[in-house]
Amino acid sequence: MRKLIYLIIIFYFACNQPAENTQSTPYVMVLGVAQDAGYPQMNCKKECCAAAWENPELKRTTSCLAIVDPISKEQWIIDATPNIKEQLQLLKQKTGTEKLDGILLTHAHMGHYTGLMHFGREVMGTNGIPVFAMPRMKTFLEENGPWSQLVKLKNINIRGIKSDYTLSLNERIKIKPFLVPHRDEFSETVGYV
């Protein structure tokens, strides 16, 4: 988990450096920074959470990054969180669209894939949105409801990825998953370079 947090911090600082030409340079946008359930946590009685319950400005959404190519107008997110509604709205405010060209999943803990439910017929009813997942994560989604219904109804199109294999999102952006040690109850865990 620590390595995943470090990656997010690295992406955050890398993305917040001034770009020479922000109109054409692909960039990463931080959409959330908190652990699985966002911040404050439900039923938390600690002083830190109490302050956030009283002051909405202290609230934070679950960790999520957007990868944006302003030339091709394509955008992807890393993880589909429980806060995906707010995060896609934030992305739309920056880019003018909440359309996604794909979702890259890290692992099967609740803060990283449960937002996929919004792509089903009850909400967005998407058609074949690419979801990139490692082998165990892919199997987990295909064999467990309600996620298996998203696959069956072709709301999502799961595309298998492999650790240390470079994936071209488009001709300008490449991404490589790498294995990260974590509690892997339901799937392996990856970070992305």
Image: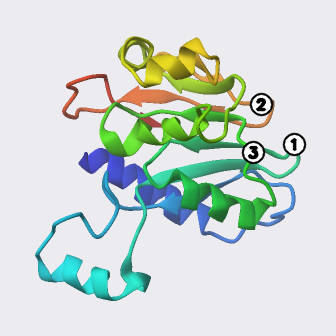
Q: CA distance from mark 1 to mark 3?
A: 13 Å
Q: Which mark is residue 26?
A: none
Q: Is residue 41 above or below residue 150?
A: below
- Residue extending furthest toward the front: 122
User: Which residue does the numbered mark 3 point to in the structure image?
Assistant: 99
User: Which residue does the numbered mark 1 point to in the structure image?
Assistant: 72
Q: Is residue 80 above or below residue 148?
A: below
The answer to whether mark 2 and mark 3 are in CB contact below 8 A is no
Q: Secondary structure at mark 1?
A: loop
The mark nearer the N terminus, 1 or 3, is 1
Find residue 28 and report its image quarter.
bottom right
Q: Nearer the viewer, mark 2 or mark 3?
A: 3
- Which residue appears at 54% of the width and 33% of the height? 104
- Which residue appears at 50% of the width and 19% of the height? 149
Residue 58: percent from left, percent from top:
37, 81
Type of amino acid at the residue the image marks with label 1: Ser
Of 168 and 143, the residue lying toward us: 143
Q: Secondary structure at mark 2?
A: loop
Q: Which mark is residue 170?
A: 2
Type of amino acid at the residue the image marks with label 3: Lys
Residue 16: percent from left, percent from top:
60, 68
Type of amino acid at the residue the image marks with label 2: Asn
Residue 47: percent from left, percent from top:
14, 83
Of 75 and 117, the residue lying toward us: 117
**Mark 2 burial class by Cα count in 10 Å: few <14, some 14-19, many 20+:** few
Q: CA distance from mark 2 to mark 3?
A: 16 Å
Q: Nearer the viewer, mark 1 or mark 3?
A: 3
